[in-house]
Image (cartoon, grey):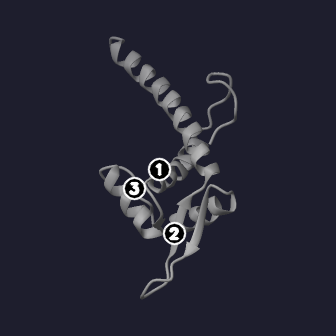
């Protein structure tokens, strides 16, 4: 999501940050347990009160990329009806979620400082 290093010691990549949010949303949903893709999308939307939604065609390529990167592991369900791929969080994915959660908190804290400061300056 961003270049490694201490906060303030790097250039902030806003586009990369936005793309990385989707990964974090998937990882956070899977922290609660294995899910198939559609359930991940439903959980993200429900737990964010509709703030975050996956657009058509974005979730499954993301899941495949995250699986290739080792953040999640997929397995095909063998239940009745249509087969579904069920994803679970790997140790690497759990570590990535923890580290990036801290990074997001730092970024949002910096943003909020800036917004509060702008609010205090008379117009």
Percent of width and height locating residue 45: 35, 56
Percent of width and height locating residue 31: 47, 52
Name the side, left or right, on which 46 lies relative to 67. Answer: left
Residue at the image point whose x is 45% and y is 59% from the top: 33
The local crowd at label 3, few if under 14, some if 14 to 19, many if 20 or more residues have their Cα within 10 Å, is many
Q: Which residue is mark 3?
A: 44
Instruction: Describe the element under mark 3 as helix, strand or loop.
Output: helix
For marks 1 and 2, give the CA distance: 20 Å
For marks 3 and 1, give the CA distance: 8 Å
Q: Nearer the viewer, residue 109 or 120?
A: 109
Q: Quadrant of residue 123?
A: top left
| Residue 107 in sight from this viewpoint | yes
Percent of width and height locating residue 82: 45, 86
For marks 2 and 3, give the CA distance: 16 Å
Q: Which residue is mark 1?
A: 28
Q: Please identify, in this view, whether the residue under mark 3 or under mark 1 is nearer the observer.
A: 1
Q: Nearer the viewer, residue 78 or 84?
A: 78
Q: Nearer the viewer, residue 9 or 75?
A: 75
Q: Nearer the viewer, residue 61 or 70?
A: 70
31 shown above or below 115: below
Percent of width and height locating residue 14: 57, 39
Residue at the image point whose x is 37% and y is 19% from the top: 116
Instruction: Describe the element under mark 2 as helix, strand or loop.
Output: loop
Q: Please identify, in this view, whether the residue under mark 2 or under mark 3 is nearer the observer.
A: 3
Name the side, left or right, on which 78 lies relative to 12. Answer: left
How many tags in the picture?
Answer: 3
Q: Please identify, in this view, whether the residue under mark 1 or under mark 2 is nearer the observer.
A: 1
Disc 1 or 2, which lies upstream in sequence?
A: 1
Q: What label sits on residue 57 in the rendered view? A: 2
Disc 2 or 3, which lies upstream in sequence?
A: 3
Name the side, left or right, on which 27 lies relative to 7. Answer: left
């Amino acid at each position: 999501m961003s270049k490694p290093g201490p906060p303030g010691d790097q250039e902030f990549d806003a586009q990369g940050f936005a793309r990385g949010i989707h990964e974090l949303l998937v990882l956070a949903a899977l922290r609660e347990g294995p899910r198939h893709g559609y359930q991940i999308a439903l959980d993200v939307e429900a737990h964010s009160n509709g703030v975050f939604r996956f657009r058509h065609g974005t979730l499954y390529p993301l899941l495949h990329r995250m699986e290739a990167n080792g953040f999640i592991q997929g397995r095909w369900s063998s239940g009745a009806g249509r087969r579904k791929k069920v994803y679970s969080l790997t140790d690497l994915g759990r570590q990535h979620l923890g580290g990036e959660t801290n990074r997001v908190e730092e970024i949002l804290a910096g943003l909020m400082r800036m917004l509060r400061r702008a609010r205090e300056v008379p117009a």
